[in-house]
Image (cartoon, rainbow, N blue to C red):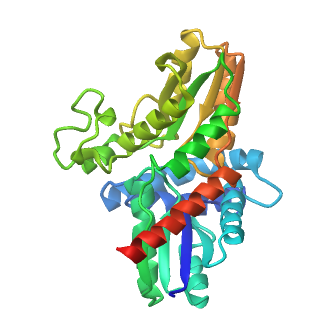
Amino acid sequence: MAKKGVILINVGTPDEPTVKSVKEYLKEFLLDPDVIDIPAPLRHLLVRGIILRVRPKKIAPLYQKIWMDEGSPLRVYSDRISKSLDSRIDDIDFEFSMRYGNPSIHDGLMKLKNKGVEELLILPMFPHYAQATTESSLKHTYKQLKKINWKPEIIEMGHFETDEEYVVPLAKSIDSQLEDDMHLLFSYHGLPVSHVKRIDSSKKHCQKVDECCSIKIEANSMCYGHHCTKTTQMVVGLLGLNSDRWSMSFQSRIGPVKWLEPSTMNKVEQLVKQGIKKLAIVAPAFLADGLETLEELDIGIREHFISLGGEELTVIKCLNDNEDWIEGLGNMITKKFKSVATS
C-alpha cells in the first residue's frame, strides 16, 4: 500500500509578538493577490506605502496580550491538532504548515517527502471555501510541490461546511456553554463582497437575490457566504434554537472595500439595543484559536459589549484539539483516502 501523508494548512502568524515580526508576516500575507485582489501596483502601494507603516505598530501589542509560553496560539493549537491526529491514526503521517510564516508549506512538504509519502492529502484548515484561504493555500502548495520536484498522488480535502464530523463537535462545544437566556452570535471571518460575487458563475444570484446565501443553487456551490450560512443552519438545527435566539455576522475587516454584512461590531451594537444582556459568540470559520478570537472577540468585542450596557459575554473556544473534533477530523481524513482508493 502507498504510504499516506497529510499536510494541514492554517493561515499564519508572526514568529514573535514584535513590530518587526508582525511587519514581515503582514507583508507576505497582504501582498498575496488572492488576499487583496487589486492590480499589483496598487496592491504594493497600499500595503507597502500605507498598511505596513501603520498596522504592525498597532497589531504587535495585540499579539503580546494573547501570546502563550509555547508561542503563537494559532501555531500552538495547529501543532496540537496535528500531533493529536498523528497519535490517533497509525498509518498516516501528519505535518502542519502555515500559508504565511512558519512552519512553511515548503518545509512541511519536505518532511513528508523525506518520510516516503506517496499519497498526499492537502487539507487547508478552512471549512468554508474562499479564494483568500483555501484557494491561496492550494495554489502555493502546488507551487512548492513543483519547486521540490515531488509528484505524489494528490488528494484535496475540499470544503466541509456541513460535514457531520465538523458540525456535530461544533454544536456540542456550543451547547456545553450556551445558557437558556443567552443569545448566540455566529461570527465568521469577513470577506470582500467582490470575492463572493466572482464565484457566482451566473452573475445573477450573489448580492442580487434576497437571502441569496440561504438559497442553494449551482451558481453559489463554492460561495463562502453560502457555506457560512449552511454551517449556521446546521448547528442551529442541532441545537434546536428558535430564530430569535441567534444571529450571524462577519469580523476582521481590512481596507475600504465593501465587505460581507453585517459586521460583528455593528451586530453586537444592534443586539444590545434590542435588549440582549447575555451574549455567546462562536467563530466557526476558525478551527484554531488565534488573534481573531482571543483578542478581537474575547477582548475587543467584549469591552465594546460591556461598554454598551451588555452584562455577560462568553466567547466559545475554537475546536482546537477538542477530542470530539479530532475524532471527527480523523474520520474525515480516513474516509477521504478510502473514497479515492475505491473510485
Measured from the top left, where is residue 8 in percent x and y?
56, 67
Tally the numbered discs. Answer: 0
Let me know if residue 219 appears in the view: yes
Which image quarter is the C terminus in?
A: bottom left
Task: Identify the residue at the far right of this view.
Answer: 69
Measured from the top left, where is residue 30 in percent x and y?
47, 57
Measured from the top left, where is residue 40 in percent x and y?
33, 61
Name the residue rendered at 64%, 27% in the picture: 280
Image quadrant assignment for residue 158: bottom left
Taking depth in this image into account, of 173 and 261 the one nearest to the observer is 173
Taking depth in this image into account, of 189 and 48 the one nearest to the observer is 189
Let me know if residue 35 appears in the view: no
Name the residue rendered at 69%, 22% in the picture: 179
Horizontal relation, residue 220 to residue 132: left or right: left
Task: Identify the residue at the far front of this view.
Answer: 342
Image quadrant assignment for residue 38: bottom left
